[in-house]
Amino acid sequence: MRVHVVPTAEAVVPGQLAGVTVLVVDVLRASTTIVTALASGCTAVVPVGDAPSALSRARAGGALAAGERRGEPLAGFDLGNSPLECGPERVGGRTVFFTTSNGTRALLAARGAAAVGVAALVNAAAAAAWAAAEGRDVVVLCAGERGRPSLEDDVCAGLLVERLTAAGLAPSPAALAALPAARRYGADVARLAADSAWARHLARRGRGRDVAACLALDTTRLVPVYLASVDKIVAGHR
């Protein structure tokens, strides 16, 4: 079995994900928000490509609409894209229709895979263990930032590659290329708050607490699993 890294959702090649296990990564903030929501008792998260569809589907089903564009909350939505907004009192027992600039695009791009998990820094070890146990080649699919790689996703990808190679998977050249970033930041991922351009942007917009919540390593064992056949992300391994 092998592990490969794709740096952005836009870099996925047609057919590339067929028959493999995919880990979708969007550290700041979609992956972390999904993990937090499901850990808080959210019934399911439904990724949606555009804001009007997310809002109309949520309203039709008595669910919550959550999301952002360029980091900013969307008018008329119940929630933004913030793990801090996803406590049990807000999302417990509810379904969330979710649309973001990058993360949901990566999730939708992964629908043709054999299995899809959601990975972030907060669940990196658990996500790697889940993917290895699936018994297939693994592709780490980074959301990136509007078609460009992002430092925080690259670091998370490298950490996942470290754990997957330790579990016996052979790294592709792209997977090997992700390792230096993991080695630079793995002992202190909080340094990404200063070094990541998107982290600095979020902090300038008053979302520094979100950044801090996302830049924490292995704080949960929960791995969200995207069941594309029923169009829902649910709590998988805990």
Image (tube, rainbow, N blue to C red):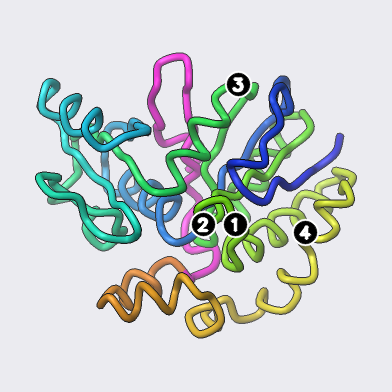
Q: Nearer the viewer, mark 3 or mark 4?
A: 3
Depth check: give the residue in front, 21 or 89.
Answer: 21
Where residue 90 sits in the image (x, y, percent)?
14, 49
Q: Is residue 227 above or below residue 71?
A: above
Q: Could you tell me the amino acid type at mark 1?
A: Arg
* Within-10-Å neighbours for mark 1: few <14, some 14–19, many 20+: some
Q: Is residue 87 visible?
A: no
Residue at the extreme top: 229
Looking at the rendering, the stretch of residues picked out in magenta corresponds to 215-238
Q: Which residue is mark 4?
A: 162
First reached walking from the N terminus: tag 3 or tag 1? 3
Q: CA distance from mark 3 to mark 4?
A: 25 Å
Depth check: give the residue in front, 46 or 1.
Answer: 46
First reached walking from the N terminus: tag 2 or tag 4? 2
Q: Nearer the viewer, mark 1 or mark 4?
A: 1
Q: CA distance from mark 2 to mark 3?
A: 22 Å
Depth check: give the residue in front, 52 or 179.
Answer: 52
- Contact flag, marks 1 and 4 (Cβ < 8 Å): no
Where residue 148 sits in the image (x, y, percent)?
59, 57
Name the residue: 41% across, 58% down.
29
Question: Could you tell me which secondary element the residue under label 4 belongs to?
Answer: helix
Q: Is residue 184 visible?
A: yes
Q: Could you tell me the amino acid type at mark 2?
A: Glu
Q: Which residue is mark 2?
A: 145
Name the residue: 85% across, 39% down.
2
First reached walking from the N terminus: tag 2 or tag 3? 3
Q: Which residue is mark 1?
A: 148
Magenta stretch contains residue 139: no
First reached walking from the N terminus: tag 3 or tag 4? 3
- Contact flag, marks 1 and 2 (Cβ < 8 Å): yes
